[in-house]
Image: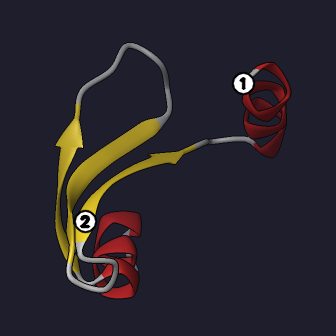
Amino acid sequence: MEIKRLLEQRLQAKLRVISHQSFNRTFVGFSQQYQQSVFVKVFLQERNWLTEKAVT
């Protein structure tokens, strides 16, 4: 299943893609499950996520 559709199902949201120069995939939308706007970043490699987690 495509990642966008999987996220939309899990978050009960209609997400739209945000273009960015990095290779990450980013989405925004309103989640019915959480009743608020959500921002989702999907990393291609786990080490990229670990690096971002360490610096933020």
Residue occupying the point 79% across, 19% down: 55
- Asked if labels 1 and 2 touch by Cβ distance under 8 angstroms, the answer is no
Residue occupying the point 24% across, 49% down: 28
Residue occupying the point 30% across, 48% down: 27
In-image side of 46 versus 32 (left or right): right
Residue type for callout 2: Gln
Instruction: State the scheme by which the image is colored.
Output: secondary structure
Q: Position of residue 45 (x, y in %)?
A: 73, 41
Element under disc 1: loop
In-image side of 30 versus 33 (left or right): left
Element under disc 2: strand
Residue that mark 1 sits on: 56
- For residue 4, which quarter of the picture? bottom left
Q: Is residue 15 above or below residue 33?
A: above
- For residue 31, which quarter of the picture? bottom left
The Cα–Cα distance between marks 2 and 1, rounded to whole angstroms, is 22 Å
Q: Name the image quarter holding the C terminus.
A: top right
Q: Name the image quarter holding the N terminus.
A: bottom left
Q: Residues within 10 Å of mark 1 (few under 14, many from 20)?
A: few
In-image side of 41 versus 34 (left or right): right
Q: Position of residue 48 (x, y in %)?
A: 75, 31
Residue at the top extreme, as displayed: 21
Q: Is residue 16 above or below residue 19?
A: below
Q: Earlier in the sequence, mark 2 or mark 1?
A: 2
Q: Nearer the viewer, residue 44 or 34?
A: 34
Residue type for callout 1: Thr
Residue that mark 2 sits on: 36
Q: Residues within 10 Å of mark 2 (few under 14, many from 20)?
A: few
- For residue 19, which quarter of the picture? top left
Q: Position of residue 11 (x, y in %)?
A: 35, 79
